[in-house]
Amino acid sequence: MNTHYDCIVIGAGQAGTPLAKKLAQAGKKTALIEKRYIGGTCVNDGCTPTKAMVASARAAYLAGRCNDLGVHIDGYRIDMPRIKQRKDEIVLRFRNGSLEGLKKTQNLDVIFGEATFTGPKSISINLNDGGTQELTADQYFLNTGATPIIPDVEGILDIDYLTNTSILELDSVPSHLLIIGGNYIGLEFGQMFRRFGAEVTIIERSERMMPREDEDVADCIKNIIEEDGVKVLINATVQKFVKDSSGQIAATVSAGGISQQITCSHVLIATGRKPVTENLGLDKAGVETDDKGHIKTNDHLETTAPGIYALGDVRGGPAFTHISYNDYTIVYRNLFEGTDYDINDRPVPYCMFTDPQLGRIGLSEQEARKQGMDIKIAKIPMAYVARGIETGETRGLMKAVVDAKTKQILGAAIIGEQGGEIMTVLQMAMMGGITYDRIRYCVFAHPLYAESLNNLFMAIKD
Ligand SMILES: Cc1cc2nc3c(=O)[nH]c(=O)nc-3n(C[C@H](O)[C@H](O)[C@H](O)COP(=O)(O)OP(=O)(O)OC[C@H]3O[C@@H](n4cnc5c(N)ncnc54)[C@H](O)[C@@H]3O)c2cc1C
Ligand SMILES: NC(=O)c1ccc[n+]([C@@H]2O[C@H](COP(=O)([O-])OP(=O)(O)OC[C@H]3O[C@@H](n4cnc5c(N)ncnc54)[C@H](O)[C@@H]3O)[C@@H](O)[C@H]2O)c1
C-alpha cells in the first residue's frame, strides 16, 4: 500500500529528529525514517559516548597527578567494563529519551528501516522488521549523516580494524593502539586510551597534526599529547598490515621517508568521514551530489530537486552536531516562520575534547593572512593565567586574531582546561561586535579563566 505524507525526514540525526517533531507539531503529516538508532552519530557513536569516556579518562589523569596537589591516594585502576557501562547508560538514556518524545508526537510516524528514492517524490523502505513499505511525500528532508573513510591499505581487511563505533564496545584496554589519522577523532581517542593505560601511536600523513589549525596551536596540542605519552608520527602513512597467529598486528609505516615496523594489538581508523548517500537512490529524485558524494545545496539548504532539503554532515558542511542542529532551525524557520536565514549568517565554533580542550571560533591567523587582512595577534600562554596556576592546569594558550583597524575580534583559539567555554565568551563578543580594547578593560570575576581575557588583549600593542 502506498501512503502519502506531507513531509518525510530520512535520518534521525541531529537535524532530522527535532525537525520531524516540529513539522508534525506544525500540523504536517510527517514520517521519520531511521535505519539504525534515533539520535544518529552524535548520540550513538560520536559526541555523547566519547565525551562520557573522556570524563573517565580525565578522572584517571587527575588520580595520577593528585600527588602534585598534596593528595595522596594508594594507586588506582581502570575498570573498563564500568567505563563502558556508564557510557552505554548515558547513550541509552539520550537515545530512548528522544524516541519517547517522538512517539508521543501527534501526526508523526517513526519507521525503522532504510529508505531509497524510487522516483522524484517516492521512496521505498527496507523495513528493519522485514518487508518493504512504499511512501510518497510533498517534501523531503535528508539527514543521513556520514560514515568513516577506510583507507586502502594492503592487509587492512584482515586485521579487524576499529572505527569510532566499534572502539566504543571494547571492555578491555588495548596493549598498543595504533591510530591512523591525527585530527579530532584520533586525538580524542588517542589521549583517552593513553590515560586508560594503553600504549598509543598516532600516524598522521600531513606535515603536522591538525593541518587546518595554526602551526603554533597544532604544535601546542602535539606537545601536550606527547607529554601524556602518546607517540605521534607526522608525514607518515601505513603501507601494509600483517596479523600474526597470536593476533598481534605488524604495521609497516613510512614516516618522513623512512620505513619502520610497528607492532600493535589494535588499529583505529580516524582518517575522516564520507557522506552516507550510496543507497539513497538520489539520481531517481534528481538530487545532485558533488565529487565527494556530498549532497549539493544552496545557502538555504535546498538541493537541486524542488521540495527536497539536505541537512547536516551529508551536505559536507562543517561536521559538527551544532551545525546539523542549526541546519534544522534554518530550514524550519524559513519554511514556517517566514524568515530568510542562510547558512553563511552563522558562526562556526567548535571544541576538540582533548584535555586541555581546544576551543575555536572564526578565522585562524593563517586564514586571515591568506586573505591579506590587516591583523594583530594577541597570545598568552596558560601558564600566565592565575586560574590555571591555582588549579594546576597551566598547559595551553589563548590566542586571538583581531582586525588592526576596526579592533573587531576575527577569531580565537583557546587551549585550556575550559577552552571551549572561554572561546564561547569571545564568540559572544564577536557576535555583539564588542571590540578587543573594551574586553581589555572589562571587569570579569576574579579568578576565572575568562578574567585573563584582559591580559590576552593587553598583549596587543596599539
Ligand atoms: C567519534 C566522534 C565524535 C564526535 N564528537 C563531536 C563533538 O564533540 N562535537 C560535535 O559538535 N560533533 C562531534 N562529532 C560530529 C557529530 O557527531 C556529527 O557532526 C553530528 O552527529 C551530525 O550528524 P548528522 O545530523 O548530519 O547525521 P547523523 O547523526 O550521522 O545521523 C544520520 C542518521 O541517518 C541514518 N540513515 C542514513 N541513511 C539512511 C537511510 N537511507 N534511511 C534511513 N536512515 C538513514 C543513520 O542511521 C543515522 O542515524 C563527532 C563525530 C564522531 C564520529
Ligand atoms: N570535538 C568535535 O567536535 C569532534 C570530535 C570528533 C569528530 N568530529 C567530527 O568528525 C569528523 C571526522 O573526524 P576525523 O578526525 O576522523 O577526520 P578529519 O577529516 O578531521 O581528520 C582526518 C585526519 O586523518 C589524516 N589522514 C587521512 N588519511 C590518512 C592516511 N591514510 N594516513 C594517515 N593520516 C591520514 C588527515 O590528514 C587528517 O588529519 C570531523 O570532520 C569532525 O568535524 C568532531
Image (cartoon, rainbow, N blue to C red):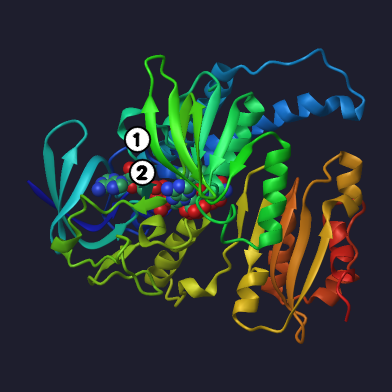
Which label is found at residue 156?
1
Mark whose residue sits in front, 2 or 1: 1
Look at 55% across and 70% down and name the residue there: 346
Give percent across and percent down for residue 344: 50, 74
Element at label 2: loop
**Looking at the image, can residue 442 be seen?**
yes
Tell me the quarter of the picture where residue 457 sits: bottom right
Q: Is residue 22 above or below residue 152?
A: below
Q: Answer yes or no: do the residues labelled 2 and 1 have beta carbons within 8 Å?
A: yes
Give percent across and percent down for residue 2: 9, 50
Look at 38% across and 20% down and name the residue there: 244
Q: Is residue 131 above or below residue 146?
A: above
Q: Quadrant of the C terminus?
A: bottom right
Q: At label 2, which amino acid type do we have? A: Ile
Q: Is residue 125 above or below residue 141?
A: above
Residue sitting nearer the eye, 200 or 54: 200
Give percent across and percent down for residue 142: 31, 57
Q: At label 1, which amino acid type do we have? A: Ile
Disc 1 crowd rating (10 Å Cα; few below 14, some 14-19, many 20+) is some
Look at 13% across and 43% down and name the residue there: 133
Left or right of 137 on screen, residue 314: right
Residue sitting nearer the eye, 64 or 298: 64
Element at label 1: helix
Left or right of 119 on screen, residue 251: right
Which label is found at residue 150?
2
Label 2 and label 1: CA atoms lie apart by 9 Å
**Looking at the image, can residue 18 be seen?**
no
Tell me the quarter of the picture where residue 59 sits: top right
